[in-house]
Image (spheres, helix red, strand yellow):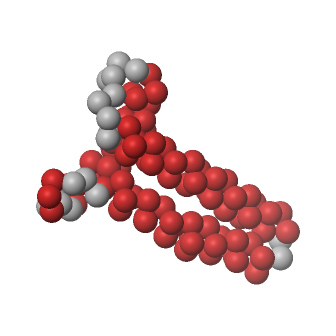
Amino acid sequence: MFILANFVLATARVLDVVLYLYMWIVIARALISWVNPDPSNPIVRFLYNATEPLLYRVRRSFPFFPGGIDFSPLIVIIAIYFLQAFLVQSLRDLAFAIR
């Protein structure tokens, strides 16, 4: 059973790192949107391609943002924090319970 516990714990750690990195990608995308970035820049294209599918779904789910301000990055960051607190911690607790 310790092999399954180690696998679940490793999955939790990898998921935690992936969520953390994606949160910083969303933050970088939000910061870049404040200026007029060059759309042909590879970094800008990467940030746009990595975040736009999720941000578009959030914008579609919450179509009205007062004042024309886009709160979709903030909603995604809150969702990432929730996943880190709930899902990752639940996987860690499950791994320790299996041992």
The image shows residue 3 at horizontal and vertical percentages of: 83, 63
In the orientation shown, which residue stands out farthest toward the bottom? 97
Q: In this view, does 67 lie to the left or right of 54?
A: left
Q: Is residue 77 above or below residue 26?
A: below
Q: In this view, does 40 lie above or below 32?
A: above
The image shows residue 27 at horizontal and vertical percentages of: 45, 48
What residue lies at 74% left-to-right and 64% top-to-bottom?
9
- Report which quarter residue 76 is drawn in: bottom left
In the orientation shown, which residue stands out farthest toward the front? 35
Q: In this view, does 76 lie to the left or right of 5?
A: left
Q: In this view, does 43 lie above or below 80?
A: above
* Residue 4 visible in this rendered orientation of the protein: no
Q: Is residue 19 left or right of residue 78?
A: right
- Report which quarter residue 59 is drawn in: bottom left
What residue lies at 67% left-to-right and 62% top-to-bottom?
12
What residue lies at 50% left-to-right and 52% top-to-bottom?
23
In depth, the one of 41 and 3 nearer the eye is: 41
In depth, the one of 78 and 94 nearer the eye is: 78
Q: In which quarter of the image is the C terminus?
A: bottom right
What residue lies at 46% left-to-right and 27% top-to-bottom?
43
Q: In this view, does 53 lie to the left or right of 47?
A: left
Q: Quadrant of the N terminus?
A: bottom right
Q: So how many labels did they put on this image?
A: 0
Q: In this view, does 26 lie above or below 6?
A: above
The image shows residue 54 at horizontal and vertical percentages of: 35, 49
* Residue 73 visible in this rendered orientation of the protein: yes
